[in-house]
Amino acid sequence: MNWTTERVPELQGYTVEWAGDGSYFLSRRNVLFHSTDLTPPFTRVAVIAAPAWKRAVSGIRLAQRLLRFMVTNVIPLASGELFVTFDRSVGVVRDGKYVDLPGLRRPCRVLRSACAIDNHGDLYFGEYVMNDARGEIRVYRYRPGAGSLEVAYTFPPGSVRHIHGVYFDRFASALLCLTGDDDRECRMLRTDDGFRTMHTVGEGDETWRAVSMLFDEAAMSYGMDAEFRANHFYRMDRSTGARTSLAEVSGTVYYSKQIGKELFFTTSAENGSARKARVAAIWTVSADGECVEIARFQKDPWHGTLFQFGTIHFPYATMSTENLYFSVVGVKEDNETFRIRRTNLQPPNA
């Protein structure tokens, strides 16, 4: 499959957070927008309350990156609400107003696309905090329309550092929870009853350390987020549990998306001994396992830990089979949005 990447100038400074069928949600700092076709001007949906000084300094892009003054998830719910994660807060947009959701035990970040909606319409996410002391880590549940969050599960002290993401496997009607970071904390856990019980899919070293997961009828696929060993794309057979390495890549894998049977993985420009190149890249994996790098972006000169690593961000959902939008952070094209287009579409009767 052939794909081409192109910059979308009219989206500079915006991040496409949700790409539906004729319905798009975008963010710009602490403001949310809606569009039917991604043609400016966009309709403002809501403003997330923030201290005046943060709003002021975040007009400087480096300050915005330093403060993490940005949205990471926008998810339309069946209730008509928008579930939103911003900086270290979690809330919903109701009737044009953003409100923080009570029940969060402490401020925490939620990584992009790291929330899952199950068959009942309930939304799950986990705490992504530094947690150097290895205290408790929680998985939260939000029932659309409810007044607050619930704690669905608590990892006891010393078990994991934090949660990279919770993902819904529609082929098994189950949730997958991905944790890190040290070898014994790298775990993939499955639950089919809302975290009342869990089954271990894999654990024990960095080959099980992942930030995102993709699913199809036959397998689960992911890329490693390893710090001390080479990173690989893996495909895990559902029937046997056997893992196959599809390719070794030079960067950690954060985010992934699927269009039809084509998988898209992003690698990051991050610090650490296992990183070989200071580039963020997009890779495709075809149905037969062929891995091809289709775009790469050079890390910018700013310190990664302070001003963010070079990363590529996909929307939470993308329902198009013809293109895929993404935004870049911490690279020379920082704060730009691009589109990947399919270039070998066949005629209907081919």
Image: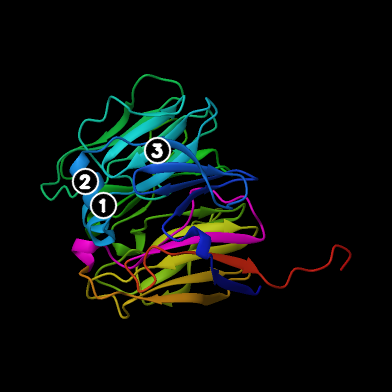
Q: Which residue is mark 1?
A: 58
- Element on which disc 1 rests: loop
The x, y position of residue 2, in whole percent, is 65, 75
* Kind of residue sitting beneath label 2: Lys
Find disc 2 in the rendering and name its residue.
54
Residue 53 location (% of width, % of height): 18, 44
**Considering only vertical position in the picture, is 96 above or below 178?**
above
* Residues tagged 1 and 2 counted as in contact (Cβ below 8 A): yes
Which numbered dot is residue 84?
Answer: 3
Quadrant of res 156:
top left
Q: Nearer the viewer, residue 120 or 186?
A: 120
Per the rendered image, the range of residues in magenta is 304-329
Q: Disc 1 to disc 2, how far (Cα)?
A: 6 Å
- Above/below status of 47 relative to 269: above
Quadrant location, the N terminus:
bottom right
- Membership of 323 in magenta stretch: yes
Answer left or right for 185 relative to 252: left
